[in-house]
Amino acid sequence: MEDPVLLVIVDGLERAADWEPEKGVPFLDEAGFRVRFLVSVGVEAPSARSSDWRQHLEWTEETSAMLHLPGDATAAEAAAQQARDTLTGSGDDGRAAERCLDALAAALAPLSKDDLIAAFGLSSASFEALDRAPRPARDLVVHADDGTYRFRDDATRARWAASTDIASLEDGIVARGLASLRAARAPDGGALTWPAYLVEYLGAHMTRRAPALSAFMELVSPAWLAAWMDRPGGLVGFVTDARRARTTAEEVLFNASTEPERAAALNHITRCAVVEGALFAKEGSRHGPRDDRAHPYKEPSVDLAKPTGAARARAVALVTLAGTLTGAERETVQAWADEARAALGEASELVPCPIPSFSGIPTEADPELTRRLRDAAPNKFGSLLSGPYHEAAAACAGLEPEEALRLAGSTEGVLRVTAFAAIVPHLPEALRERAVAEVMDAYWQHGDDDTLRSVLACAPWMALDDASCVLCDVLGNRWQKDFENLLIGWGGLTDFAPLLRRLGGSAAIVGAASAIAEVGRWLP
């Protein structure tokens, strides 16, 4: 079959650990070409209507089918209530057995006795009490052949959880996990044997409980990477946790009300992007065979000792960012750049990357070009500005402000982005925000990666929400070639220097440089 259909099966959607429909965040992106979704929801799901689930998922009837799994909610509720009633009259043993069932209700997957003890702070006595509990309580639990425990079905688990303080239990998991992580990071911490459940689900519990951003950033650390590297699928697991941290940092950025708050959030976002890029460079599958049908899927793995191949790009990025700063901040970043350059073993100077900016754009008009721009037919004005953004801006030097706005306004589609961007440096300050607002409106409707530098050059006059959206949408999400591109390529960190300054001042640029330098030592 030339174009086979990809069937994505989502089994038990209502138990997705990270997904909260109320926040309006899609569970997955929309279906692509010849992609179909098959989704099952259990009897304990909040709604049994397919239309409600499709609305949450933002998928269409043409691309998705919903299966509602059979089950008896009434029987599940009766079983859970009977078990509680029998344990209530069983004294200390009953309370100990209840604690064990409460933990299983809060768990996001079947787990072993040792994991239950480590993650939930239970004692062996709780399991012994459950073993001695009246049969209605024991019948709620399945002890599988692999040694894991779970509720007999999701419906019964949901009914038990309804009368349990799940939030407090999850807060306890998060506290124990972070305490273990801090102990592992301590200079005298030594080797730590991590419970499998804590490694695989700490990030998910944190997402559900939404602790402070600083707690999430503890997951973007060498100690947490080491914990994941001992697990199957460790690369994917760690990067998933890093993405959880980045998502939290992005939420903080959008809600920040001061420049220092935005700078702090940006520091975390750039660190997550650099860590992810370095790990993907070490994993290296993007450079391997691309015919997935001829080469079956293999679990990604990473050799942390393998160089990223971006040592020179890292040094160039630091030199470039240092050049945007002054005073003590410049000296700090330049010291990091000197360290990175020394590691290269090269005596030659490193040439900074050009940064998108309208500074230095020629203001002397070319009469012939000005005439052609004025005589352009509707929607042809933009096509005359198809070169690099700085050349397009220089071409508009001879236009009067209102004339420039009128001509740019005659363009349509993606040309509207470059047309309005080109006239920005020639407008009086009072009109620049108006023109940049037009740039952003056109970019969100028609823009592409080719127009990105035109947009970034407009950063000094960009609305904060637009600046945040561009950075979160592009940085670290669209690089296709290698790690070097993330640092100094099109849409890389150096390109984003004007946007970092717009949002977080010079502190945000120092933070980005710090991320490049520190991650370079950790993941060279």
Image (cartoon, helix red, strand yellow):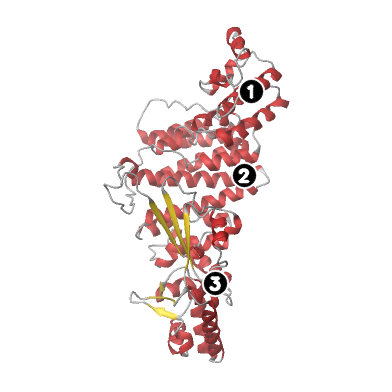
Left or right of 520, for residue 423? right
Question: Residue most toward the front?
Answer: 62
Counting every numbered tag in the picture gives 3
Going by the numbered disc 3, the residue's amino acid type is: Leu
Which of the 4 image quadrants contains residue 456? Answer: top right
Q: CB of mark 2 within 8 Å of CB of mark 1?
A: no
Residue at the spot 65% in from the left edge and 42% down from the top edge: 259
Image coords of residue 339 (percent x, y): 43, 36
Q: Earlier in the sequence, mark 2 or mark 1?
A: 2
* Spatial CA span between label 2 and label 1: 36 Å
Q: Earlier in the sequence, mark 1 or mark 3?
A: 3
Counting other residues with Cα less than 10 Å from the Cα at mark 3, is it few (<14), some (14-19), or many (20 or more)? many
Residue 217 position in % (x across, y down): 51, 53
State which mark lies toward you, 1 or 3. Answer: 1
As drawn, is 310 to the left or to the right of 177?
left
Above or below for 24 versus 435 = below
Image quadrant occupied by the C terminus:
top left
Residue under numbered circle 1:
410
Q: Which residue is mark 3?
A: 169
The residue that mark 2 highlights is 262
Amino acid tagged 2: Arg
User: Quick one: label 1, few (<14), some, or many (20+) residues within 10 Å?
Assistant: some
Q: Nearer the viewer, mark 2 or mark 1?
A: 1
Tag on residue 104?
none
Q: Nearer the viewer, mark 3 or mark 2?
A: 3
- Front-most of 410 and 232? 410
| 76 w.r.t. 133: above or below | above
Whichever of callouts 3 and 2 sits on the residue coming sooner in the sequence is 3
